[in-house]
Image: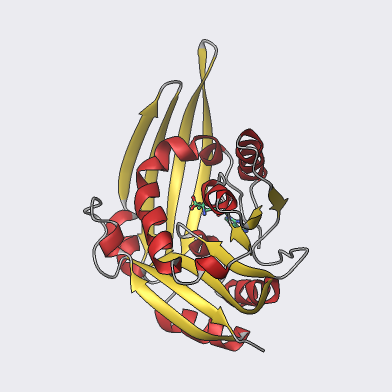
């Protein structure tokens, strides 16, 4: 099934979502603290604008960054070039990506895993991640749960920045385990404003589904944390809305 890659959202992603960076960064630092000293190579899957890839590269980790969106890949490469950090960026689908070497750690943050369209895709991503990790390597990811879909994928949100405005009409269908955001972008172009439409969809994964799929793919350990303690300033996120996982690939 075709996925519509981020286009306009890529261009304004850092401006719109910068307030979420702190909890995302804090959760990663805390959960990965025990394993990070042993990580030499890593990949940020669905890397967005490259923020996490650059944080790891600054620590001296050999970094790969993968995203489906050409705009996201370009932004990551530009950020890495500006910071003079050696991040190797690949435009690829998380269902079929391949890396030139097996890595110690793969991260996939900010509910990127909810973006895969079909239920069968979760198994395909788990297998692709397993293939890309060295034995004993880790996969770190977070997901939105059904409760999160109900809490914050509803209603209309309006963001306005100089030269840009976006209206996001959010919705979810509990029975279909899906949530979506219909975005209407108004982008200033000289004296005109141009309107663009974009849709992002998420699929809700149940925790038992995640556990089963990752076990079948060859991960022997899956630890989970509720994300609420990291999102203290976001009143919409309460227990059960988001979960952070760390999966360990069997040593071999
Ligand atoms: C919510 S953003 C998260 C970006 C980044 N991980 C972060 O923490 O800011 C979701 C990202 O997933 C990417 N994406 C969606 N579907 C994908 C797929 N099938 N394969 C790879 N990347 C995908 C999007 O282009 C977007 O950059």
Q: How many marks?
A: 0
Residue 117 visible in the picture: no
x, y percent for residue 185? 47, 32
Q: Residue at x 52, y 46 (%)?
A: 51
**Quick one: quadrant of the C terminus?**
bottom right
Please state the quadrant of the image where ligand 1 appears. Answer: bottom right
Picture quadrant where residue 178 is located: bottom left
Q: Residue furthest top?
A: 191
Picture quadrant where residue 245 is located: bottom left
Q: Between 140 and 173, which is closer to the camera in this rendering?
A: 140
x, y percent for residue 39? 58, 67
Q: Is residue 101 left or right of residue 127?
A: right
Q: Is residue 201 above or below residue 8?
A: below
x, y percent for residue 116? 56, 64
Q: Residue at x 72, y 52 (%)?
A: 90
Q: How is the image coloured?
A: secondary structure
Q: Residue at x 38, y 64 (%)?
A: 30
Residue 233 visible in the picture: yes
Q: Is residue 204 above or below residue 19?
A: below
Q: Residue at x 46, y 21 (%)?
A: 163
Q: Between 55 and 95, which is closer to the camera in this rendering?
A: 55
Q: Is residue 108 left or right of residue 130?
A: left
Q: Between 187 and 87, which is closer to the camera in this rendering?
A: 87
Picture quadrant where residue 238 is located: bottom left
x, y percent for residue 21? 40, 48
């Amino acid at each position: 099934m075709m996925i519509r890659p981020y286009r306009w959202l890529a261009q304004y992603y850092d401006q719109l979502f910068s307030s979420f960076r702190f909890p995302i960064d804090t959760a990663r630092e805390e959960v990965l603290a025990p394993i990070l000293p042993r990580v030499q190579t890593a990949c940020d899957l669905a890397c967005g604008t490259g923020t996490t890839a650059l944080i790891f590269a600054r620590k001296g980790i050999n970094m790969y960054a993968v995203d489906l969106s050409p705009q996201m890949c370009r932004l990551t490469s530009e950020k890495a070039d500006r910071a003079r950090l050696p991040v190797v960026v690949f435009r690829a689908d998380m269902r079929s990506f391949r890396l030139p070497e097996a890595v110690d750690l793969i991260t996939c943050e900010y509910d990127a895993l909810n973006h895969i369209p079909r239920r069968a895709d979760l198994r395909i991503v788990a297998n692709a991640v397993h293939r890309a990790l060295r034995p004993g390597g880790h996969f770190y990811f977070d997901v939105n749960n059904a409760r999160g879909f109900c809490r914050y994928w509803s209603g209309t949100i309006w963001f306005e920045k100089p030269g840009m405005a976006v209206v996001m009409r959010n919705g979810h269908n509990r029975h279909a385990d899906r949530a979506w955001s219909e975005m209407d972008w108004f982008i200033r172009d000289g004296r005109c404003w141009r309107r663009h439409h974009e849709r992002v969809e998420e699929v809700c994964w149940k925790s038992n589904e995640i556990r089963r799929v990752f076990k079948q793919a060859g991960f022997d350990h899956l630890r989970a944390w509720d994300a609420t303690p990291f999102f203290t300033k976001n009143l919409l996120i309460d227990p059960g809305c988001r979960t952070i996982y760390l999966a360990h690939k069997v040593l071999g």
